[in-house]
């Protein structure tokens, strides 16, 4: 039976963020990552990434250089973006600068018949 494509997002919101890795989700079924985005309030910068079982989902860390603006990361190879049931999704704050008050990391995930 084919599954109609369904998009969902996994979000981490941090107050006074600091460097670290945060577990977001365990994939219940096969799916794939469609986007990694970040939004920063205050401070002068933040650098983030997301991961699957310890492997980066962005080909390079995303530098969130502009406050109060959604920024998108450049995704890694398609094979890295595919999740199997049981894989773990993480969000990583690599570094922060200038004391941001809030940092949001959003990962868009799609489940469909072709994952």
Image (cartoon, rainbow, N blue to C red):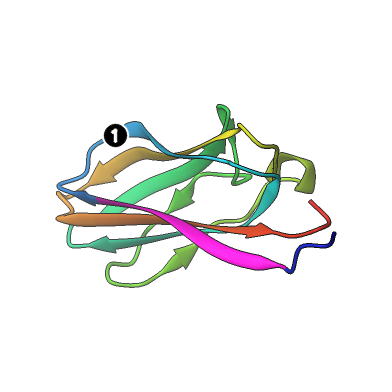
Q: Secondary structure at mark 1?
A: loop
Number of numbered discs: 1
> Which residue appears at 36% of the width and 35% of the height?
22
Which residue is most to the front? Answer: 1
Question: Residue 1 occupies which quadrant of the picture?
Answer: bottom right
What percent of the width, then of the height, locates residue 38? Answer: 40, 59
Q: Nearer the viewer, residue 113 or 60?
A: 113
Q: Nearer the viewer, residue 66 or 13?
A: 13
Q: Nearer the viewer, residue 94 or 107?
A: 107
Q: How would you classify the magenta stretch by its main secondary structure? A: strand
Q: Is residue 76 above or below residue 88?
A: below
Which residue is most to the top? Answer: 54
What percent of the width, then of the height, locates residue 93? Answer: 35, 40
Judge from the rendering whether residue 79 lies leftward or rightward of residue 57; answer left or right: right
Packing grade of label 1 (10 A; few <14, some 14-19, many >=20) is: few
Question: Residue 92 occupies which quadrant of the picture?
Answer: top left
Judge from the rendering whether residue 74 lies leftward or rightward of residue 70; answer left or right: right
Judge from the rendering whether residue 41 lies leftward or rightward of residue 35; answer left or right: left
Q: Which residue is mark 1?
A: 19
Q: Is residue 102 above or below residue 70?
A: above
> Which residue appears at 59% of the width and 46% of the height?
58
What span is colored magenta in the figure? 5-13
What percent of the width, then of the height, locates residue 111? Answer: 68, 57
Asked whether residue 114 is drawn in magenta, I would say: no
> Which residue appears at 28% of the width and 61% of the height?
40
> Which residue appears at 60% of the width and 33% of the height?
87
Question: Residue 79 occupies which quadrant of the picture?
Answer: top right
Asked whether residue 6 is drawn in magenta, I would say: yes
Q: Nearer the viewer, residue 42 or 112?
A: 112
């Amino acid at each position: 039976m084919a599954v109609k494509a369904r998009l969902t997002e996994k979000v981490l919101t941090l107050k006074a963020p600091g460097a670290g890795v945060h577990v977001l989700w365990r994939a219940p079924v096969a799916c794939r990552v469609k986007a990694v985005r970040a939004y920063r309030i205050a401070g002068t910068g933040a650098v983030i990434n997301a991961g699957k079982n310890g492997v980066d989902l962005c080909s390079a860390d995303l530098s969130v250089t502009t406050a109060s603006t959604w920024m998108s990361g450049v995704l890694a190879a398609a094979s890295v973006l595919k999740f199997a049931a049981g894989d773990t999704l993480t969000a990583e704050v690599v570094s922060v600068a200038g004391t941001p008050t809030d940092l949001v990391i959003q990962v868009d995930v799609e489940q469909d018949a072709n994952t």
